[in-house]
Amino acid sequence: MGKKGRARKAQRRKQKKQQKEMKNMTKAPSNYKTTTKTTWATSSKANCHTGQKKIFTTTGGIDVYGGGRNRSGGWWKAPVVVDLAMGPDETMAPLNKSALSGGTIVPAGWSCDDHTGRIDPPKYMIELDFPDFGVPQVDKLFWYALCDDIIEHNIKSISTQCAGGHGRTGVQLCILYYLLNDDDVKSTIADAGQLIELIRDLHCHHAVETDGQQRYIANVLDIDVGDSKIESTYGGWGGGYGYSYGGGGSGKAKSITGKTLPKSTTKTQTSGPTTTATTGFDLSEEYKMLPKPVQSALTFEECDCCGEVDYNVDTEECTNCGWKMPDPNGDPMMCYTCGKVKCEYDFLSPSDDTCITCVAKEMKVKHNNTEVQCSVCKRMRYTDMFSETTADGFVCLACEVKQ
């Protein structure tokens, strides 16, 4: 084995050690005392809820369900065929599409289709533009019109969902609970903070995850925001690995990479509303002749992913396929499906809450603890070498750039 191969193995060993350390850091301290009250800050999301369950029934007799797709809680898991299913657009279909067809496809109109286990979709479906850890990209009038539509179309059962069944599901549940109940119920709710606590009691103590979501609820319902019900860091203990819940992305954002250009000596500094550029040289003498910056030579090596000699040693990124050397010191992330704490490169995107291994298991793709099979080249690849899935499985970065 050459020097380069030994270096890669050392890097992998370092990553595994880091994963083990992060897992130990998320364990409760030995002197931690449990209480009868479970709080947002001291409870894990790993085993808080599963399935699509009825959360409440409105005064008008409408049953409202809630759950998370990645926690066996999509609309297709509801105990009844709901009249209306709604949620963020990317969560409205199961990870494994055969879950709806029963795995067997027959010609349309054939009677044997009644015995395949196929699940028919609800009569009405709403796919929201609703970024993870963000707010719905619709204004308050949308929700009032939606409730009018629910009454007009005689909707008696509604399924709400998102990926994990927490933040975005909680927002939907809060708004529907307030708008679909009568004035007597509304009069008992003083502010958005109280409403969030009520929904947490009915559904899950992690419902609604950001201050922005709490403010959005208050704005839509024309009620006070109330005291913040959001813990700024995940978990009650984390060995210093607290991470803030800001407004997340609307899905996986893939960067476009090209040949790396030499770093410029120009520094940019922002002052007030304008942005000015100043060079790294002393310009106190107005007409001073400046030496031409010397461009340092770039070092490229063979990429571990695509095999091309386009891996920039300085930036640790391949300019051909876009693969980056995993950072073992990155923020830990919780997989809400398996309940394990993993590194960021074990997920398709930072906004996902299900790790690549669990997605592969759900899609019945060949995998192990660190690798997944590419559906194109059929090679077992490290999880950090994938950025997207297709109907056939995973496509590694090397095959993706070829396509």
Image (cartoon, grey):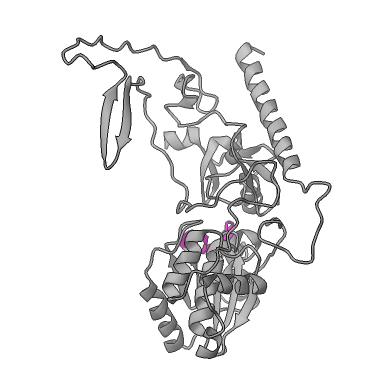
Name the residue rendered at 55%, 42% in the picture.
Answer: 375
Our reading of the magenta stretch's main secondary structure is loop
Q: Which of 143 and 218 is in front in this view?
A: 218
Q: Which picture quadrant has residue 164?
A: bottom right
- Residue 213 location, x and y as percent? 49, 63
**Can residue 133 be seen by looking at this rendering?**
yes
Q: What stretch is highlighted in magenta?
A: 89-98
Q: Does residue 285 appear left or right of residue 171 in this picture?
A: left
Any magenta on residue 100? Answer: no
Q: Does residue 30 appear left or right of residue 282 in this picture?
A: right
Screen quadrant of the N terminus: top right
Name the residue rendered at 62%, 31% in the picture.
Answer: 328
Numbered marks: total? 0
- Residue 186 location, x and y as percent? 52, 84
Q: For the view shown, which residue lies furthest in the front direction?
A: 284
The answer to whether 362 is drawn above or below residue 319 in the figure is below
Q: For the view shown, which residue lies furthest in the left direction?
A: 287
Screen quadrant of the C terminus: top left
Q: Which of 244 and 69 is in front in this view?
A: 244
- Residue 196 location, x and y as percent? 58, 70
The answer to whether 386 is drawn above or below residue 209 in the figure is above
Q: Does residue 111 appear left or right of residue 398 in this picture?
A: right
Q: Which picture quadrant has residue 299?
A: top left
- Residue 286 location, x and y as percent? 17, 16
Q: Nearer the viewer, residue 362 or 336?
A: 336
The answer to whether 157 is drawn above or below residue 38 in the figure is below
Name the residue rendered at 45%, 54% in the picture.
Answer: 250
**Can residue 117 be seen by looking at this rendering?**
no
Q: Which picture quadrant has residue 205?
A: bottom right
Name the residue rendered at 27%, 28% in the picture.
Answer: 277
